[in-house]
Image (spheres, grey):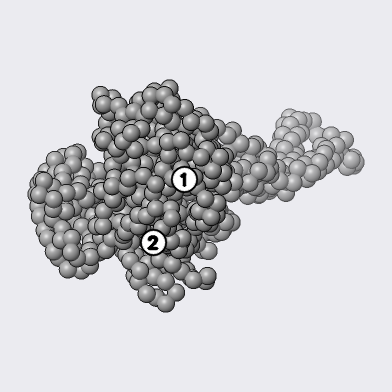
Amino acid sequence: MQFKHPEFLYTLFALIIPVIVHLFQLRRFQKVNFSNVQFLKAVTIQTRKSSQIKKWLTLLSRLLAMAAIIIGFAQPFLALDKIVGKKSKTVIYLDNSFSMQAKGAKGPLLKRAIQEILSDLPEEETISLFTNTETFIDVSKKNIQNDLLQIAYSSNQLSYSAAYLKAKQLAGSSTETIKRIIMVSDFQQKEDQFTLPKNSEIKTHLVQLQPVTKQNLAIDSLFLERNINNNLILNVLASNIDTNPENTSIALYNDDKLIAKTAILIPENGTAKAEFQLDESIKINGRVTLEDHLITFDNSRFFTINTPEKIKVVAINEANDNFIKNIYTSDEFVLISCSIEQLNYNDISTANLVIVNEVKQIPISLTNTLKPFTERGGTICFIPAVKGDVSSYQQFINKFSAQGISSEKVQEKKITSIHFSHPLYRGVFNKKVTNFQYPKVNSYYHANASNTVLSFEDNSPFLYKTNNLYIFTAAINKENSNFKNSPLIVPTLYNIGKQSLQLADISYTIGQTNSYDIPISLGQDGVLSLISNEESIIPMQQSFSTKVRITTDEVPTKAGIYSLQDNTKKTIQHISYNYNSAESQLQYYNLNTTQNYQVSESITELFDQIKEETSVHELWKWFVIFALIFLLIEILLLKYLK
């Protein structure tokens, strides 16, 4: 038992006063003469004994009454020692990711959590609460009631460790405060193990909300490919979690017009593929949908097929350029191929890729022209000549990078190493190839480079990239190399050309870093915006002379088809964004209480427990009642005890 005003307890020393009065009997007796009292002797002795008992009982009741009043003024209470005199700080993380759409015993998990917070949180208590998208600091239930009821589902979910660190920051660093972190989520399994940082100063509570069923149908991904008849096919990959396999209808729309529909049988806990043939002659703002009433965010995926833009390539030659013309064909590229004497420098300013093909000596004028070209986002592919002017090569490369080439050496070398993880070969190889005929060179230039694409047998570079410059270290004409006859030449040069302008994919994933180029020239104050029915944003962008590079990561936040518009509201093209399909995998951690955290099944259960742990039981009312009881006993003793 503890006291709010312990100084009142010193008054208990005053209880010695009635004891002293009782012991010393300050009242004097008066003698009264009487004739013969012998016959009253027995009665007198009995009366004296009764009087002494009555006095002791009266004194005891009086002392107890006074003591109860004094203790009542000291305001005694019962509480845990560690919470006495300390303030509390509660931070709640409320997961509003899409998986919280799953149905629990009392409805959708997120809605149930919000209702329990609003019903069980004390009116006067101040807390901090944050979701994956919003943060409320030092607010009461009344302040955030409307905001909580309007919280929407989010595609971006904080990792649990990141949510914990943010909650820890909101809880503060005061050692005089009882800090408590409450994490409310379904705790969907993202990694192999669930871990939280250890912190003995903070009490951590996990409320794991479980759905009554894990059933879910979802569209996982979309991708394009060509069949054996060279028709363009849209592949739709759909998954089934814990649902009895049956025919599932999948529909394809162009804007709001239904253009195709099919049914597929998706095995339980498996996947199936649906195929739609597309007309390449029309522009498509597509949407693929299926019906599933349990979790709805993954029922649709969007894609866009825009009119392809041709990439402009300028080839400067002092060697045969037939292989360049065969790779950069007119259906995808605009190729200008000429000798160094016939070069129109104005063509470089509008190009995406410039190929310097075995020019023996590079003039200073070309170097000075290509420098601002790369600064505007252009790409250069440099192929040296046999017995080229090394000093002009070094002067040329040093304008762009310190990783240049040095002296030429006549020696046969095989090209044996392909760096399959390099972005240039992304999607080219199904597996690492080891049993192919290695191309070779008869002479090469020494180079010291790090970002190697193709290597010789001694691991020295044959092709490497530095900044916006691809550099071959050997001539590839027929007299010096058989690289032109190798199957590597087509994907290598083709992808160099394709990646010089990063055309938009058919769709992008929200929450990931996405980058693509728009072949348009904007003015000094020109800005591109992404516009949909639900969002209007200005993404991060970098403007060059021939293109604008768009980069998105945290925005947009809503799945759909966005029109890319300039300042005049003119639509340049359409871009599609989809939610991450990882939220569709309804796999959850199996959490149990540990030394680091306590696990509860509901917010109501946890709040009741916290209320019991932090409650203060005031006892002063009981001592007032005891004082009244003892005073009543004293009155009864004085009145009825003879």
Residue at 28%, 60% (x, y): give it. Answer: 308
In what element is the residue under mark 1? strand
When the figure is inspected, residue 187 is found, relative to residue 370, above or below; the finding is: above
Mark positioned earlier in the residue sequence (2 or 1): 1
Residue at 20%, 57% (x, y): give it. Answer: 289
Q: Position of residue 437 (x, y in %)?
A: 26, 26
In what element is the residue under mark 2? strand
Of the 4 image quadrants, the one containing the C terminus is: top right
Relative depth, front residue between 326 and 501: 326
The amino acid sitting under disc 2 is: Ile
Quarter location, residue 111: bottom left
Q: Which residue is mark 2?
A: 518
Q: Which residue is mark 1?
A: 469
Camera sees residue 399: yes
Residue at 78%, 45% (x, y): give it. Answer: 8
The amino acid sitting under disc 1 is: Leu
